[in-house]
Amino acid sequence: MKKAILIIILLVFVVAGFFGLRFYNKYFGNNVEKDGYILIPHKANFNQILDSIAPYIKNRESFEAVAKDKGLQANFKAGRYHVQSGKGNTDLVNMIKAGNQTANSFRIGDFGDMYQMIGKVTKKTELDSLHFVNDLDIIAQEKGYKNIEDLKKYFFIDTYNFFWTVSPREFFAKFEDQYNDFWTSERKNKEQQSGLTREQIYALASIVYKESGGKKDEMKTIAGLYLNRYRKGMKLQSDPTVIYAINKETNFKESIKRVFYKHLSTPSPYNTYANAGIPPGPICVVDKNSVDAVLNAENNNYIFMCADPARFGYHKFTASAEEHAVNAKAYQDWLNSKNIK
């Protein structure tokens, strides 16, 4: 009798263990076959969610059963989700229900215009570039600007993190907060002392950035040189402004590696060979260093600069037209020797 009872108890434990293990594996056991990311749009339906996650999991049926049991059909949040090895169905369902998405990394570079920048950014967002541009145009107009191009000064070159579901207003708000934080009372005082408007500061900073190639150690020297030219009433004669004028005309489809005499007359308010003064706006998105370089420009007497073929990426500076002519010829000879056209 006792033996029979023990056998029954043992059988109960075996059966309970069997179903308990199945329950555990179904809800908590690893069901991820390979790591990856899934995108769930705002208008997704349950089948779309299942189709998105299916390539990354071992058992679609068990995930679907747990998802239904936990009400995922009617309660999910759009987003970009990281499906990680070791996660069970419950982990995956809870992640999607809670909206615990993984951010995307965005690199804001020295884009020539905002349309070019948004075209790159929106490759990592749910919304397309047209939607983004239209909404940012509205934001620009609300601020009293003409269009999205006038928002360029709010952006700085750097790497940022955003969710795939970011809205245009959420996107811009992050940069507006950064812009406001950047313009401290100290920088505002230097802005007033410079005698330049903020638009002029950004336009000049963009020239400094392009001329320096983003190298911080020459920025203040270059800023001082261009301020010397500007205050003397001379044309700035910056090659990057000519390149920008041509690029803007061709919608940034033409790549120019070398500025020739024929390019200098390109009709554009941004062309500093054709027009005196500082351009009406920045020729690219700038970094914080280039703005600070304008606000803290080096006090020098330089008027001329020329790329230095002996120090790639750097320049020779001088106040002498004769010396500049020698430097320019050396650089042109170097370009010709490299067959750069």
Image: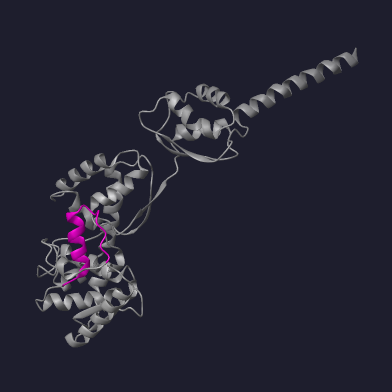
Residue 274 in the figure: left or right of residue 307: left
Tell me which corner region of the image, top left, top right, bottom left or bottom right, holds residue 186.
bottom left
Q: Residue at x 59, y 31 (%)?
A: 58
- What are the residue bounds of the magenta stretch? 237-257
Front residue of 135/59: it is 59
Find out whether residue 253 is within the magenta segment.
yes
Asked if 23 appears above or below 230 in the picture, the reply is: above
Residue 182 percent coordinates (x, y): 28, 62
Asked if 87 appears above or below 171 in the picture, the reply is: above
State the quadrant of the C terminus. Answer: bottom left
Residue 25 shows up from this direction: yes
Q: Residue at x 30, y 56 (%)?
A: 178
Q: Residue at x 24, y 40 (%)?
A: 130
Q: Residue at x 80, y 18 (%)?
A: 11
Residue 162 percent coordinates (x, y): 37, 47
Find out whether residue 244 is within the magenta segment.
yes
